[in-house]
Image (cartoon, grey):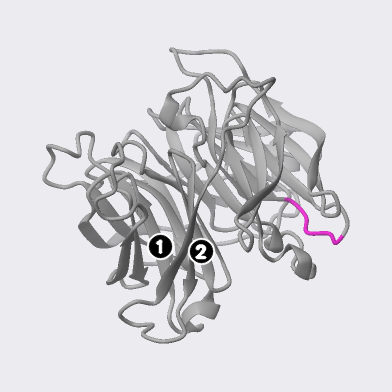
Amino acid sequence: MAYADIVKGLSKVSLAEDVTLRKRISNAHNDDIHGLQMLDTSVFGDKELHFLSGSKDGMVKMWSADGEMKWKMPAASEGADLDPYCKWITALSSCGERFQAGTRNGILHSWVKKESDRVAQPFQHVRSSEIRPLEIDGRRAIAKERNLSRINCIFPVSKLCPENERLRNLIFLGQPRGVSIFNTATSSVLSSQILHRNDWTYCIVPLSNAASHPLLAIVIGSALETHSFDSDKNSLSKQSEVWSCHSVQSGIRPHIASLAKMCDSSVLVGGCFDGCVRCFDPVKNCCSLELEGHSGRVWDVLSLSSSTVVSGADDKTVRLWDIRCQPGERLIWTSDNLVGRASSLLQISEFCVVCGSCADKPQSSREKGCLYFLDIRCGK
């Protein structure tokens, strides 16, 4: 796709002239921060913004928008006889007054808002459910035992079909090989679909929320596909392959670790393991733009507007891009103050992006999982 086609119709916004570090929270977690998730305003109201963080240390924590920790809860029971590699928090999701956390060994934990004591203990842990591995002819995927049921992503079906009350308790779970639809009210898997013999489902992003057969963008390994969802049959149907790359360069396949929809646009942006940030066109089924600059795996991306993208990677940088600019001028800013790799990103307000990071060797490092509050605005 030509550059002019990419930017056609995109809203014009001012470029950020400066990005500053508003706050750094050292040792926010004892290990890599795998996920950041905004809580719905229905939990505390519009004037009290809070977000969640999940880590390899097995903890879920709640933070205020100014960086004060308000609540924490281990996903695994205290004293549980678990391999520490199993209890990693690998996925977070929030919908209304409920949120879920998924772990590396396939345990789905659910919390709901308490009616009382909301300051000291705002949430109640309601259940933990074991998600089984997806099998083909009785055979499991080729992976480490603790990864066979890994929950890579969670997406509430109700956000795809908000008017359908019957779907309010359903969530999509991205797993090795495919996707399961889980009922949080009955703690049961309603259906599972195999999407690949061995690759993992990393991301599920809505493209449309039509009442009938809404469309999803789904990442399986290094392939990006679109699927329609039949809410009556609780099933997915592949519509197109937007992009795929199965070649290996420097020993790395370009797995798409994160995916976001550009604001007010059909363009999708993905962070890939080969260090590239890619823009995808799900209408023309192609990669429309490549943003090169990271020297390590890109773990997370988010869209600030119809033309600006933030990315975080193994190279210990957070980068700000503008896709309207000419080649060689699209990189607007690069961070230079992270202790470790940038593993997760979250926009918590118009001008503030939170980055979760981790030192290369958290067990021996003084600073482990840190949170960085980056202030992005013009004319500073």
Q: Looking at this view, name the residue that lies furthest to the bottom.
A: 116
Q: Quadrant of residue 176?
A: top right
> Does residue 370 appear in the picture of this structure?
yes
Q: Looking at this view, name the residue that lies furthest to the right.
A: 212
Mark 1 crowd level (few <14, some 14–19, many ≥20, 10 Å Cα): many
* Residue position for label 1: 52
Pick the quarter of the image with the C terminus: bottom left
Percent of width and height locating residue 46: 51, 83
Magenta stretch, residue numbers: 207-211
Q: Quadrant of residue 312?
A: top left
User: Residue sitting at 59 percent across and 25 percent down?
Assistant: 199
User: Residue sitting at 22 percent across and 49 percent down?
Assistant: 30
Label 1: element kind: strand
Three-letter amino acid code of the residue under disc 2: Phe
* Residue position for label 2: 99
In the image, residue 208 lies in the stretch drawn in magenta:
yes
Count the marks.
Answer: 2
Percent of width and height locating residue 79: 24, 51
Three-letter amino acid code of the residue under disc 1: Leu
Mark 2 crowd level (few <14, some 14–19, many ≥20, 10 Å Cα): many
Residue 241 is tagged as none
Percent of width and height locating residue 54: 38, 53
Q: Mark 1 and 2 residues: CB-CB less than 8 Å, in contact?
A: yes
Residue 201 is left or right of residue 361, and the answer is right
Percent of width and height locating residue 189: 66, 48
